[in-house]
């Protein structure tokens, strides 16, 4: 399957790209959709009656619809476009009316973007409880049962760790949240690009993810909210109201009330095209393909001498986001060497997860390799040879 897909990513002629957890590459049809907007019908949305503006508005709305269908949302009004996952989570954190004594439960596995917004809520009197995974990044559901109480207003958990690639037990958490009357927010930044998301099946109240990690343009992200009318907007201005008078205003319904100002029109249209691309390839087909690559990568890394791999080794508990270190080497030096020797791009350092790194005792962080649909078995093998060579230096 992969030759055809690779042809859509001409950048791959120059690099073995294994940093998709940071940002994915952009296929030609998405580049074309973005360029097509600028070349052919560049106009603002929801503000003009002329044809270009109507076409831009239609395509902008269609992108909401496509993303809604992609994640099994009931209505496009539940899908709010943001600039990234960070903005999406902040929008929820600032949009909920907190009361003194409310509690937020989060975890030590979180990216800073699903940690710092809750610290800010803590400064407003919200209590914070932090659940720890084991040293492989795997949670015990019982630890959440113990942490979630009647005072818990919200549980905020990553679906898949951006460091260890491990999968969190979201459905089980949804059941507990339901019993305790708590809201559930899922950071799906690392899951939405790789596994089929169905918000109803997951049973959550909020899902946040980034368009740029799933073949879309940078500057695109999504906050899905089950009941958008119960959340306050955090930005006020053009395009988000029904009526304004000198003594008051009435907010627009659905996503519009959260998308004040001129949005990232071209980006969002590109994201809609990225969703089409993933759907055409088939999320299930991609999932199976990536699983095979991830297994090859994990098995290969584990066999190498002087290489320490982090996170669960069970295929059922993880995806192809893998952290490792070479004994005695700084992770940045390993990443630089991979680039220099073999044109392999990986991320190194703390991966915006300092609390997790401290917990794992990894002061310099890790080297992180992350795979996507355009990677191949040959690339994984080249990567393994390159790591082996560096480990022997
Ligand atoms: N959140 C992105 C990563 O993990 C940037 O690399």
Image (cartoon, rainbow, N blue to C red):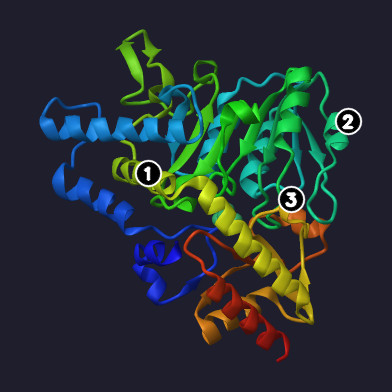
In front of the other: 112 or 101: 112
Question: How crowded is the residue under tag 1: few (<14 C-alpha within 10 Å), some, or many (20+)?
Answer: some
In this rendering, the count of numbered labels is: 3
Q: Residue furthest left?
A: 50
- Which of disc 1 and disc 2 is earlier in sequence? 2
Residue at the spot of label 3? 317
Q: Quadrant of the N terminus?
A: bottom left
In this picture, residue 138 sits left or right of residue 23: right
- The tag on residue 175 is none
> Where is residue 56 shown, x and y percent of the image?
22, 35
In the image, residue 238 sits, relative to residue 135, either above or below, namely above
> Where is residue 165 shown, x and y percent of the image?
68, 55
Mark 2–mark 1 distance (CA, rounded to whole Å): 42 Å
Question: How crowded is the residue under tag 3: few (<14 C-alpha within 10 Å), some, or many (20+)?
Answer: some
Mark 1–mark 3 distance (CA, rounded to whole Å): 28 Å
Q: Are marks 1 and 3 in contact (CB under 8 Å)?
A: no
Residue at the spot of label 2? 146
Residue 60 placement: quadrant: top left
Q: Quadrant of the C terminus?
A: bottom right
Q: Dot 3: what SS?
A: helix
Residue at the spot of label 1? 276
Residue 142 placement: quadrant: top right
């Amino acid at each position: 399957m992969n030759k055809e897909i690779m042809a859509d990513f001409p950048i791959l002629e120059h690099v073995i790209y294994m940093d998709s957890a940071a940002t994915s590459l952009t296929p030609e049809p998405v580049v074309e959709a973005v360029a097509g907007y600028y070349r052919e019908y560049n106009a603002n949305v929801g503000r003009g009656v002329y044809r270009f503006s109507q076409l831009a508005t239609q395509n902008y709305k269609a992108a909401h619809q496509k993303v809604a269908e992609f994640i099994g949302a009931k209505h496009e009004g539940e899908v709010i476009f943001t600039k990234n996952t960070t903005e999406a989570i902040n929008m929820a954190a600032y949009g909920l009316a907190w009361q003194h004594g409310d509690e937020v439960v989060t975890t030590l596995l979180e990216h800073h973007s699903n940690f710092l917004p809750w610290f800010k809520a803590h400064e407003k009197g919200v209590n914070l409880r932090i659940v720890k995974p084991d040293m492989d990044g795997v949670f015990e559901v019982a630890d959440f049962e113990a942490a979630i109480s009647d005072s818990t207003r919200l549980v905020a958990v990553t679906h898949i760790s951006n460091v260890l690639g491990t999968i969190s037990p979201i459905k089980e958490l949804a059941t507990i949240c339901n019993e305790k009357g708590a809201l559930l927010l899922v950071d799906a930044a690392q899951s939405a690009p790789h596994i089929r998301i169905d918000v109803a099946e997951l049973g959550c109240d909020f899902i946040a993810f980034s368009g740029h990690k799933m073949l879309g343009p940078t500057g695109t992200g999504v906050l899905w909210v089950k009941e958008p009318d119960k959340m306050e907007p955090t930005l006020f201005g053009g395009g988000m109201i029904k009526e304004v008078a000198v003594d008051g205003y009435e907010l627009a319904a659905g996503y519009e009330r959260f998308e004040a100002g001129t949005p990232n029109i071209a980006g969002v249209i590109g994201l809609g095209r990225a969703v089409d691309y993933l759907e055409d390839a088939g999320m299930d087909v991609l999932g199976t393909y990536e699983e095979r690559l991830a297994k090859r990568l994990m098995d290969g890394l584990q066999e190498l001498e002087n290489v320490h791999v982090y996170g669960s080794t069970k295929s059922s508990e993880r995806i192809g986001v893998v952290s490792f270190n070479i004994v005695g080497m700084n992770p940045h030096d390993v990443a630089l060497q991979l680039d220099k020797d073999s044109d392999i791009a990986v991320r190194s350092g703390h991966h915006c997860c300092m609390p997790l790194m401290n917990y794992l005792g990894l002061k310099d962080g890790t080297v992180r390799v992350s795979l996507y649909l355009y990677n191949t078995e040959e690339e994984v093998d080249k990567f393994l040879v390159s790591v082996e060579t560096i480990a022997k230096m």
